[in-house]
Image (spheres, helix red, strand yellow):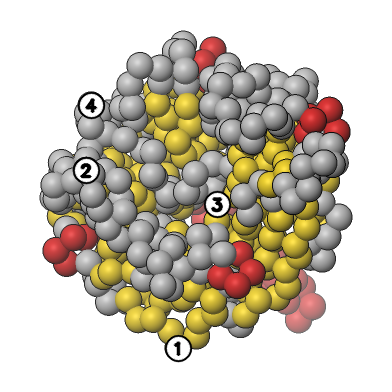
């Protein structure tokens, strides 16, 4: 046999051996993929700090007017029902004469606050979260009170922790307040929309203007009483700001408590210029959409903005604003109908991704709070079971719902009673009881950040 044939024989033998080895490896891999358990999913937020916030009683139990305490726990402890958090004995007092307006960075390592009322009302501050009561105020601050008052409403945009938007509107006055001889035309306040750079800690810009309604609405005495809960659209070129409406008697100027409500209204302004305010109106919802102390409008993945109503004559609705920044009045989602109750009222809610949300609500005849899973696509809502509900549980001042992956964290404490962190799964609907929340008389926990 010549050398050429010998080499070919060796190559053929090697090829056969390689083929056999490869086939065996693939067979083994196939068996492994069938028989071995799938690897546990990795939680990218496993090491984040979770801030728990509690409101101190001022004059009356549950009023939250005595200030705000915070305490940071690791995620593992937050999920551990044998672990106890006592924010009132062991926590850190955040600057605020009354209840602080808190926001946190996406990674939980920074806490943002604008003090509410008092000598330091309107002062923005930033804290480094180091665990427990170790919150270190960074040597940066800015006061926005000269523009937006000492009690501004504000929200952090979902833009990578870059921007906060503070809003305010002065008390509405009549156009003829200083000259009764002039015919009445409207009640209006002066609105302020202010952009706050959360990283450089400075006022990036602000605009002030009156925001007119339709002439026929203003002649009846309707006006914008409060602005709150701004959200940025998907295109990044418009801010949508929630409104709280008011009606005054055009003859006397007296505020009316019972009146026929207009369709829910949202103010749309250009971004980042904050100019060119205009008002859009819903024909589906008839309540305010300013929320109270938390986010109230959320941008979904497809560019839709979902918005809850409060003080709605037909019970709270979830409204839909399309990517063209107009209400989609073909989308009808009544929480009364979905939950099978009367007088559903959204105290606080949070979008959890993929068309799912968690809503904290009350219903007619009681101030007791409940939680519900909501499917915004199917327009369904189901009360969450597995939570220790109590007649003294009230979410009226609730601020912070944390979404981490599929998990939604809420603090559940009746006023003056101990409670727990609960972890709801937006995909599976499961409920897990987390850390115990130690309470004090008259106090309650108002958020997870």
Residue designated by label 3: 26
Residue designated by label 4: 391
Residue at 66% of width from left, 46% of height from top?
172
Residue 139 is marked as 1
In front: label 2 or label 4: 2
Q: Is residue 421 left or right of residue 230?
A: left
The numbered mark, 3 or 2, whose residue comes first in the sequence reads 3
Answer whether residue 257 is visible to the viewer in this image. yes
The numbered mark, 1 or 2, whose residue comes first in the sequence reads 2
Quadrant in which the C terminus appears: bottom left
10 Å crowding of disc 1: few (<14), some (14-19), many (20+): few
Q: Is residue 160 left or right of residue 448?
A: right
Q: Position of residue 241 (x, y in %)?
A: 68, 48
The numbered mark, 1 or 3, whose residue comes first in the sequence reads 3
Q: What is the secondary structure assignment of the residue under circle 3?
A: helix
The alpha-carbon separation of the residues under discs 1 and 4 comes to: 43 Å
Q: Position of residue 242 (x, y in %)?
A: 65, 44
Q: What is the secondary structure assignment of the residue under circle 1?
A: strand
Q: Is residue 296 left or right of residue 367?
A: right
Nearer to the camera, 136 or 422:
136
Answer whether residue 264 is visible to the viewer in this image. no
The alpha-carbon separation of the residues under discs 1 and 2 comes to: 35 Å
Residue 61 is marked as 2
């Amino acid at each position: 046999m010549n050398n050429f044939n010998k080499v070919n024989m060796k190559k053929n033998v090697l090829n056969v051996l390689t083929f056999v080895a490869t086939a065996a490896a693939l067979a083994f891999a196939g068996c492994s993929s069938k028989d071995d358990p799938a690897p546990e999913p990795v939680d990218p937020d496993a090491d984040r700090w979770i801030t728990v916030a509690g409101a101190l009683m001022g004059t009356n139990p549950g009023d939250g007017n005595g200030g705000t305490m915070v305490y940071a726990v690791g995620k593992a402890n937050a999920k551990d029902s044998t672990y106890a958090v006592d924010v009132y004995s062991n926590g850190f007092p955040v600057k605020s004469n009354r209840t602080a307006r808190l926001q946190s960075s996406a990674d939980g390592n920074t806490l943002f606050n604008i003090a509410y009322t008092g000598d330091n009302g309107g002062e923005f501050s930033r804290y480094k979260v180091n665990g427990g009561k170790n919150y270190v105020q960074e040597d940066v601050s800015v006061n926005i009170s000269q523009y937006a008052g000492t009690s501004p409403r504000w929200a952090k945009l979902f833009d990578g922790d870059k921007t906060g938007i503070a809003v305010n509107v002065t008390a509405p006055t009549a156009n003829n307040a200083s000259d009764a001889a002039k015919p009445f035309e409207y009640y209006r306040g002066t609105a302020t929309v202010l952009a706050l750079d959360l990283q450089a800690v400075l006022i990036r810009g602000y605009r002030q203007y009156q925001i007119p309604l339709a002439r026929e609405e203003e002649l009846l005495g309707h006006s914008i009483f409060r602005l709150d809960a701004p959200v940025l659209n998907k295109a990044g070129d418009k801010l949508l700001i929630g409104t709280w409406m008011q009606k005054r008697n055009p003859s006397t100027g007296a505020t009316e408590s019972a009146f026929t409500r207009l369709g829910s209204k949202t103010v749309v302004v250009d971004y980042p210029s904050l100019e060119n305010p205009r008002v859009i109106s819903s024909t589906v919802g008839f309540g305010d959409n300013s929320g109270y102390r938390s986010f109230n409008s959320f941008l979904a993945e497809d560019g839709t903005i979902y918005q809850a109503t409060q003080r709605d004559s037909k019970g709270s609705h979830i409204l839909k604003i399309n990517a063209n920044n107009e209400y989609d009045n073909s989308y009808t989602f009544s929480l009364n109908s979905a939950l099978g109750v009367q007088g559903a009222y959204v105290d606080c809610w949070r979008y959890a991704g993929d068309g799912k949300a968690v809503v904290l609500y009350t219903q007619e005849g009681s101030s007791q709070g409940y939680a519900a899973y909501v499917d915004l696509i199917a327009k369904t809502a189901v009360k969450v079971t597995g939570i220790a509900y109590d007649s003294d549980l009230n979410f009226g001042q609730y601020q912070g719902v944390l979404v981490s992956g599929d998990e939604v964290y809420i603090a559940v404490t009746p006023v003056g009673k101990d409670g727990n962190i609960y972890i709801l799964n937006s995909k599976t609907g499961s409920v897990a009881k987390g850390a115990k929340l130690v309470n004090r008389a008259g106090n309650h926990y108002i958020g997870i950040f």
